[in-house]
Amino acid sequence: TALDGRMFALDKETGSPAWEQTIADPAVAETITVAPLVVKDQATTGIAGAEYGIRGFIQATDLNTGKQKWKFYTIPGPGEPGHDSWQACPPGSKGFCDPDAWKHGGGSIWVTGSYDPALNLTYWGVGNAGPDWNNDQRPGDNLYTDSVVALDADTGKLKWHFQFTPHDSYDYDSVQIPVLVDMNWNGTPVKLMLWGNRNGYFYVLDRETG
């Protein structure tokens, strides 16, 4: 991947390009700063640029063809689960509130996610909402910013999410690496996710259910 939004595959013997695909659009401040996560026959990555008003997403690209397999927006649009967390502007907001905040709500990806082959789930930490500090412009919890999202690796469908810092006004992000462990919890074997978050708390999540 490259900062100008391209993903490309190279022949391992010659170094010659096999294919090239444009994923992010620098013209609208999208960029790629993260290494792709290779799972089965696809490479999955996300885009950065929340400070410049992007609407973040995670995309899986077919390793053989370079074509998009699926795309998951980290800022849900109308009709998508979580869109109601970008609330309408209250009466008397006097122009400080943006009624279309979700269209440029941030949600960057800039640390590579993790994958559980037994559950076939891939986990990604999502960055801050945009704008970072002027939170009055975006009422609500602002999903899926400052969250971990668990996606079906084959389809990109959301399995579950956990938001560490709703309506973040401190630029905490949640792009730490999801550490996946199998261990006993209160005497029972469980599949866990360990997460040291930028908000100052350490979390232990059930990675099957969130």
Image (spheres, rainbow, N blue to C red):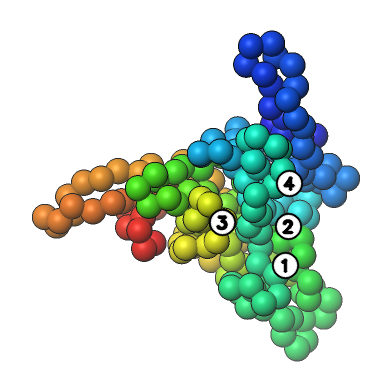
Disc nearer the start of the sequence (1/2): 2
The residue that mark 3 highlights is 155
**Residue 129 in sight:** no
Quick check: marks 1 and 3 in contact, CB under 8 Å?
no
Amino acid carrying label 1: it is: Trp
Quick check: marks 2 and 4 in contact, CB under 8 Å?
no
Amino acid carrying label 2: it is: Arg
Q: Residues within 10 Å of mark 1 (few under 14, many from 20)?
A: many
Q: Which mark is residue 49?
A: 4
Quick check: marks 1 and 2 in contact, CB under 8 Å?
yes
Q: Residues within 10 Å of mark 4 (few under 14, many from 20)?
A: many
Q: Find the distance from the CA under tag 1 to the CA under tag 2.
A: 7 Å
The residue that mark 2 highlights is 55
Residue at (62%, 46%) from the top-left corner?
60
Which corner quadrant holds the C terminus? bottom left
Q: Nearer the viewer, mark 2 or mark 4?
A: 2
Q: Which mark is residue 102?
A: 1
Q: Find the distance from the CA under tag 4 to the CA under tag 1.
A: 14 Å
Q: Find the distance from the CA under tag 2 to the CA under tag 3.
A: 20 Å
Residue at (66%, 59%) from the top-left corner?
73
Q: Nearer the viewer, mark 1 or mark 3?
A: 3
Q: Find the distance from the CA under tag 3 to the CA under tag 4.
A: 25 Å
